[in-house]
Amino acid sequence: LIFHDYMKVIASFLLWLAGITAALGILFFSYVYIQDIQVNGFKTILSPIPQIVEKSLASNSKNTYQYWRPSTTRIVPFKIEEPKLSALSALSYDLSSDTLLYSKNTTQQMPMASLTKIMTAIVVAENMDMKSQITISKHAATIGENVMGLTEGEKVTVEDLLYGLILESGNDAAEALADGSPFGRDEFIHVMNARAEQLGIINTRFTNPSGLNGDGRQYTTAIDLLTMARYALSFPEIA
């Protein structure tokens, strides 16, 4: 019995040793290292495995190694021609580096449609309690077009309405927030315009909180929209 137990211990040890050896072998052969080799201007990651496999198979395949290199065929070149846009006005801006990348007629007045909701969100973030509830009016529930799906008489928090405003571009959410604001709808629109002017957004006019047509001429410019968007992103409730 003692001899049998002794042999079991030895067998267990040998199995453990074999497992460790195999694991070390796998780690060694799967070791990936970086060599200072340029592929279309990029450093590439090389692994010894493709070469080992290729040699061991002694095949005529010449493309095995290529599978281990990053594809650079779809990389957009750094030097590109200025885009030719049919848009009347356009602006591209890198917020992370505060760099203007492209501009075209950035001060030309243009209709803004649902981008109105950026300023609606700003006024809400500055003046309303996210946890307070608003009772949805018939006007808000039946505004139409893009909606988050509100029903007359239901109670919804300002926070949820803000989500519906931004994520769904909900016209019903915009009207509900204006209706339920401390100012009331008409004064809410006045605050939108006054706040825009305070932020230096002087070539923009709002006539409702949703951007729908029908309440008079409303307009903005590409540069005003950039100013508005940058300021809006300073609020965690919006960003």
Image: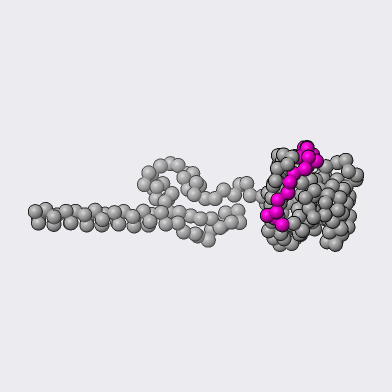
Q: Is residue 106 visible?
A: no
Q: Position of residue 26 (x, y in %)?
A: 36, 53
145 in magenta:
yes
Q: Viewed as shown, does residue 43 lie left or right of 80?
A: left
In the picture as drawn, the residue positioned furthest to the right comes out as 216
Report if residue 33 is visible in the image.
yes
* Res 126 quadrant in image: bottom right
Image quarter where the C terminus lies is: bottom right
Q: Decide if residue 26 is on the left or right side of residue 61.
A: left
Where does residue 109 sit, x and y in percent of width and height? 89, 50
Q: Depth check: give the residue in front, 134 or 225.
A: 134
Specify the quadrant of the image occupied by residue 31: bottom left
The residue at the point 31 percent across, 53 percent down is 22
Q: Nearer the viewer, residue 11 or 211?
A: 211
Q: Which residues are magenta?
A: 129-146
| 200 part of magenta stretch | no
x, y percent for residue 218 = 88, 47
Secondary structure predominantly adopted by residues drawn in magenta: loop
The answer to whether 167 appears left or right of 180 in the picture is left
- The residue lying at 80 percent from left, 41 percent from top is 139
